[in-house]
Image: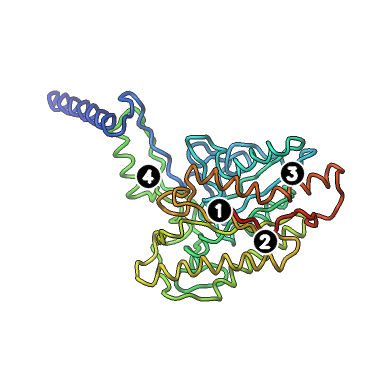
Amino acid sequence: MALLIASCLVGLVLLEIGLRWARYVRRDISFWKSWERPAPKVLSYERHPYLFYVKRPNVEGLHPSNSLGYAGKREVFQGRLPRSVRIYCAGGSPVEFNDPAEGPDSSWPGKLQDILSARFPEVIIECINAGVAGYTSAESLSDFLFRGIELKPDILLVYHNGNDAWMCQMVDGFKADYSHARLPKPWNVGWINRIPQIPWLASYQLVWDWVTQKWGKASGLLFWISDPPWKTVGYFRSDAVQTFRRNITHLVRAAQACSCHPVLIKWECNWSARKLPPFLERRPETVDVYFEFLHANNKALESIASDSSPCSFLDVGPFEPAHFFSDTVHFSPSGIVEMAHRVANGIEPLVRSIIESKTGGIHEPLGQHAGLQKEWHG
């Protein structure tokens, strides 16, 4: 028995050395560096009685949040700071995600705040990152009604389209309330996802990673809010676009009702790649239908902005393929920077008019400034 135990221990030591050496050779990672894996994504979110789900407050790691549960670590105060312009950025993961190499506030809303702060040093610029992975226009509408309005933003930036098309409009059995694709489940993350990590044991961490990915559905959030893969429609339906239009229209009206200027941003991706998101059936017509929905939703955004005053439409495209990761929808580090600059250039006249009205430079109704750009082409 003692010999068996000793042999197992020697085997584990040799396995550990081999794994670390292989990682050093293949990825040039220090032999002595710990082997900690990212925590399951779903642990960064929690159920909410009215908003379906929200980001969990004070999260560290790849999906950071502040004390109010907004993306990034910059704190947001319930009250308004004097001489400040507050911008509420609504959307899904392309709004939420940051560049881990640059820190928790390196999302494009975070960089937008940095850019505008440099351009308008006389005031405090706050960009609240209300992007949440998996959110459609329905969740952002509820979020703004129940949480966003309370923060009294001056500007509402809306970047939606892809999640609506992918997870709702393309799913068979469409219902206007999205209940055909959004399923309330107990937010009770199983014990498998809570298995403790031991970063200094590479062999243990590999087993931990395999177990959580295979049985804990740790790679994504969708399994807690839906049941992918979905039965996919093979045709375009205009009523699904009307639902998207309804959600965005109500979001715009809610913003206008509290003297907040809405800005609808055209959805962008690597259009040339024509890549289909996961969990949809791979049929020849599916890609065409998916992109037909994306284009129709973008047209709806432009139409809503044209019919709703004050409301701006911001065309930030086109982007280069290098501005996106391989999934073609999430911005790469260079894409995050580019997006932030394009949005900053587009809303700069609006920000200036708000500052002038607040600081006594020029007093005029919000949205009537002559230099306000209704549309900006990059």
Please state which amino acid type lies under the numbered disc 1: Tyr
Q: Amino acid at mark 2?
A: Leu
| 318 horizontally vs 114: left or right | left
Callout 4 touching callout 1 (CB < 8 Å):
no
Q: Where residue 358 sits: x, y (%)?
A: 83, 44
Quadrant in which the N terminus is drawn:
top left
Residue at 40% in and 60% down: 275
Callouts 2 and 4 close, C-beta under 8 Å: no
Comes first in the chain, label 4 or label 1: 1
Q: Secondary structure at mark 4?
A: helix
Q: Are marks 3 and 1 in contact (CB under 8 Å)?
A: no
- Which circle, 3 or 1, is nearer the viewer? 3
Alpha-carbon span between mark 1 and mark 2 = 18 Å
The dot on residue 53 is 1
Q: Amino acid at mark 3?
A: Val
**Disc sitting over residue 251 in the figure:** 2
Dividing the picture into quadrants, the one containing residue 197 is: top left
- 327 or 65: nearer the eye? 327
Q: Amino acid at mark 4?
A: Ile
Quarter occupied by residue 356: top right
Calculate the distance from the C-alpha at mark 2 to the C-alpha at mark 4.
38 Å
Q: Residues within 10 Å of mark 1 (few under 14, many from 20)?
A: many
Residue receiving disc 3 = 85
Q: Which one is in front, 22 or 209?
A: 22
